[in-house]
Each structure stands twice: as structure tokens, then as C-alpha cells.
Image (tube, coloured by chain):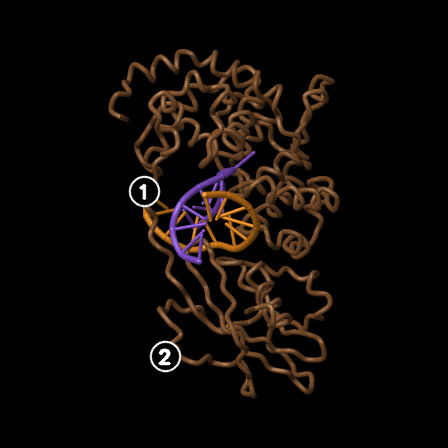
Chain colours: A brown, B orange, C purple
Amino acid sequence: MFGVVTVAEKDRLVEQGEDLADSLLDWYDGNARTLPWRTSPQDKADGLKPDPYEVWLSEIMLQQTTVATVIPYFEKFIAKWPTVTALADAELDDVLVDWAGLGYYARARNLYKCAQFVRDELDGVFPETSEELRKLPGIGPYTAAAIAAIVHDEAATVVDGNVERVMARLFNVDTPLPDVRPELRDLAEALTPSHRPGDYAQAVMDLGATICTPKALKCDGRCPWQDFCISAKAGTSEELPKRLKKAAKPTRRGFAFWGEYNNHVWLRRRPEEGLLGGMMEVPSSDWVPSNSWDNFPPPQVPIIANWREMPGLVTHTFTHFHLELKVIRLELEEMINLQEGVWAPLDRLDEFALPTVMKKIVEHVRAPVLDL
DNA sequence: CAGGCGTGGTC
DNA sequence: TGACCAAGCCT
């Protein structure tokens, strides 16, 4: 089925680029989602421009993260830090506390670094071109293009996962990702209009998020590009884009040390770089690749005492491995001096930058009966 | 430059 | 229910 798609067919589609853009923008004008960081058509008509800070913040949060997940985080950040300067003036730890749960914590560290750079070197004003934006920490090709297009209507080509999927289907490209990425980018670039490039970019992403979805496509009668779409004619849309299979995730195992004293728990900060960098943690042993708990070596406990192993496991999946933790627990009779870390009040743990895996440990200890 | 880097939703 | 996937960037 794929073989019948000719080069000439793709070329013809590229030549209809203006028609494609017009159809998509018409659809967008009637179907654009209302999002907290998005400037309404009415406001735009009144000459209002999107706020670069809001667009930047939203785009960073949206990296590899769904709109539904981002919205409450975005609202919280804007309420607490209404400007890039306010964010730059915050403490990094406060930013990490409010980012906790959103994942990819290097984004938060780069967000903060970027805010301080804009404050200190750019008089608090974001650059206007994608080329300049690209130089800022945490801003790559996608984010630079998206901000420049949305805020300043630069005719930048915005390529994210949605755009790749839409292009692969529109042109019926069956070469698997990630090798096909440059080809999909070239196609996206060929279609990028000079008229309303910001709306166009958001329209393609909305199309990918609501119609041209990974599964359960909603082409029929709803997709503005259905009549153009080569894979729709060929009946191959649902199997595109193809991807190389990823290696199965290995499992790592370890022990978490729950040390409690007088309604406080021992927490410490993780190293600035790497996994969960800069976030707080319940201290633990190394997380060791392992096939089973059988014969798994006992932990090197931080202090010699009567640690009790709790029933059950805390499990979590990261990008590239599964984790299983056993929790061993120690109730201290008297305060001891910690070489590192802090005693965190159990009723104020929301003030600490605990990533989700660490919140799971807290839940496991405090509601073990639910862990059946 | 291939691999590290979170999490929640979906099927 | 485990694998796949999402508005990517950094080293």
C-alpha cells in the first residue's frame, strides 16, 4: 500500500501549501481551544499580543507533557510569579517545590537559569527572534520557533511530536522515527505559511492533539486536511508514524530509609545534576539493576539501629527503568544529629520539593493498609 | 550524538 | 497491565 505513493504526489501536495494553510486556519478560527496562555482571537483583533513570559513558561511546561497536566501548574506559577523578573527573584527551591510532580526537573532548573539571564542580561525582556531565543537555557529548536511564531509572528517552522505525526500521515511517509525526522521537518518547513505563522503552528498542534491523534483518529468530516491527506486515501493513517521499537526497560531495586522522630522524617537533597536533580528525597541505598528480590543483598543502613522492613513495595517507572523499593523504617527515641539533610515535619511535606516517586514512599509509609 | 531525563493517561 | 505515548533539551 505504501509503495504506490509517488514522489510527484508529495510534490503536488507541497505545491498546494497555501490551500492547506488556509483550510487549517479556517478550521482553527472556529475550533481553537481556549488555553490559559493563549490570546483569544478577540484580544488579538484588539491588537493585544501574547505575553512572551506566559508563552515561554507554557512552552517549557508543555515539553513532553500534556495540556491537561500543565494547566494547573501554569496557573500556580503565574499567580505566584506574574513576570519573568518575579520568577528570577524567587529561590530556586521554591520553584522546584511548585514544579514537583511535573517531571523532567532539568526543565525547572533551566527555567530558573533562563529567567535570571533575562533579568540580568536582557533588562527583563525576552529576545524576539527564534535565533536569539535558541541561545537561552532550556530553549531548543522547537521552543524557540514556537515562541517567535506565537508572540511575534515569525515564519518559523515549529516541529514537535504532533507536527511529525501530522506530516507523516499527510504525506504517507512510512520511514520509521527517529530516522525520518529530518524529512518530516523539511515537509513541515515547505508548508509553513508567512501569513499568521503563529496561529498556523498552534493549529497544527491542535489538529494533532484533537483530530490527528496517535490512536482513535477522528478524520471523518472533521479534519480540515482530510481531502489532502495521502495516508487517508491509502488507509494507512492509523499505523503512522512508524517507530523503531524501543528496548524494554530494565528494573532496578533498592531500599528507602524512612527515619522518623517526633513526627518528622529525614529528607535530604539530591545532587544538582542527573536523575531528579536538585529535588528532595527520602534517603535510599543505590538503585541496582536486578532481576529479583531473591538473594538481593541487604542494604548498608545509614546508622546502625533496629530498622524494620515494611511489607509491600513502592514501584515507579522512570523514562528508562522501572524501580522497586523496599522501605525500611526506624523510629528514633531521641533527636540525632544528621550528617546531611533535614528533619521535615510530616504535616508540612508539601513545602518540600518531593518528586512523585518520593511522594509514593510517603504514601506507602503513612497508609500501608492501602497497599494491598 | 545516542542516551539520560518524569509523569500520567490510554489501550 | 505493561507498553506506548506526549507541545524536547542537554551532553
Picture residue at 32% right of the left edge, 15% below the top: A9
Between discs 1 and 2, the one toward the N terminus = 1
Q: Secondary structure at mark 1?
A: loop
Say which quadrant the C terminus of chain A sits in. bottom right
Front residue of A105/A316: it is A316
Q: Which image quadrant for residue A350?
A: bottom right
Front residue of A269/A68: it is A68
Q: Please state the chain letter of the residue tagged with numbered disc 1 in the rendered image.
A: A
Taking the view exactly as shown, the residue that stands out farthest to the left is A3
- Residue A244 image label: 1
The Cα–Cα distance between marks 1 and 2, rounded to whole angstroms, is: 36 Å
Q: Secondary structure at mark 2?
A: loop
Label 2 belongs to which residue?
A295
Image spot of residue A66 (x, y percent): 56, 41
Picture residue at 40% right of the left edge, 69% below the top: A288
Which amino acid type corresponds to the residue marked 1 in the rendered image?
A: Leu
Question: From what the image shows, is residue B6 above or below residue A177?
Answer: below
Front residue of A41/A151: it is A41
Image spot of residue A315 (x, y percent): 49, 64
Say which quadrant the N terminus of chain A sits in. top left
- Mark 1 is surrounded, within 10 Å at the Cα level, by few (under 14), some (14 to 19) or many (20 or more) other residues, namely few
Dot 1 and dot 2 residues touching (CB under 8 Å): no
Image spot of residue A12 (x, y percent): 35, 12
Picture residue at 55% right of the left edge, 33% below the top: A133
Both on one chain, marks 1 and 2? yes
Which amino acid type corresponds to the residue marked 2 in the rendered image?
A: Asn
